[in-house]
Image (cartoon, rainbow, N blue to C red):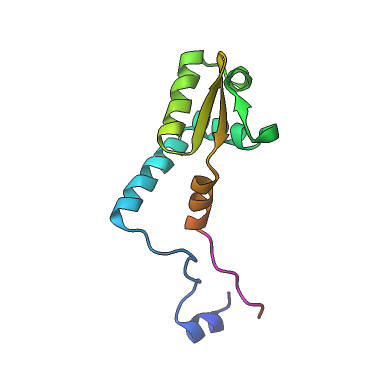
Amino acid sequence: MELDDVSATGTCCAPLSGPALDESEASELAKVFKALSDPVRLRLLNMIASADGGEACVCDLTGAFELTGPTISHHLKVLRQTGLIDGERRGTWVYYRVVPERLTRLSGLFALPALAPA
């Protein structure tokens, strides 16, 4: 953006495209970001979101880490508690999938509106 653009509009950046957060939603989303601040949880979420068929078995997730099964289970529990993933038990295994609405909400937090060509 050039200086002339700033003086013409009075701002340097376009506002975010979504509505402002209220205190309750900001508090809830802060918990989600706190959960995602852990590299293991971020990788787990990425692995689940990019899995073939849209879901991943816990048996496929544990091998990617040098962590114990209970530790991986704890990280998955945190992701479930924040509403980022959901799981379904099938026999002895649990299959996880992302909750699309939650990821869409996160991505929309910082989305800028489409800018008209100059």
Residue situated in front as seen by the camera: 68 or 3: 68
- Main SS, magenta region, reads loop
Residue at image location 55% in from the left, 84% down from the top:
4
Residue at image location 36% in from the left, 59% down from the top:
21
Q: Does 22 appear in magenta?
A: no
In the image, is 29 to the left or to the right of 5? left
- Residue numbers of the magenta segment: 111-116
Among all residues in the image, which is located at the extreme left?
Answer: 23
Residue at image location 47% in from the left, 56% down from the top:
109
Residue at image location 58% in from the left, 74% down from the top:
1
Among all residues in the image, which is located at the extreme front?
Answer: 91
| Quarter that holds the C terminus | bottom right
Q: Does 114 appear in magenta?
A: yes
Q: Vertical placement of 33 versus 105: above or below?
A: above
Q: Where is residue 25 in the image (x, y as percent from the top left)?
A: 35, 52
Q: In which quarter of the image is residue 62?
A: top right
Q: In which quarter of the image is residue 34?
A: top left
Q: Where is residue 42 in the image (x, y as percent from the top left)?
A: 53, 35
Residue 68 can be seen in this image: no
Q: Position of residue 110 (x, y in %)?
A: 49, 58
Among all residues in the image, which is located at the extreme right?
Answer: 52
Q: Position of residue 69 (x, y in %)?
A: 51, 14
Residue 21 can be seen in this image: yes
Q: How many marks?
A: 0
Q: Vertical placement of 13 versus 68: above or below?
A: below
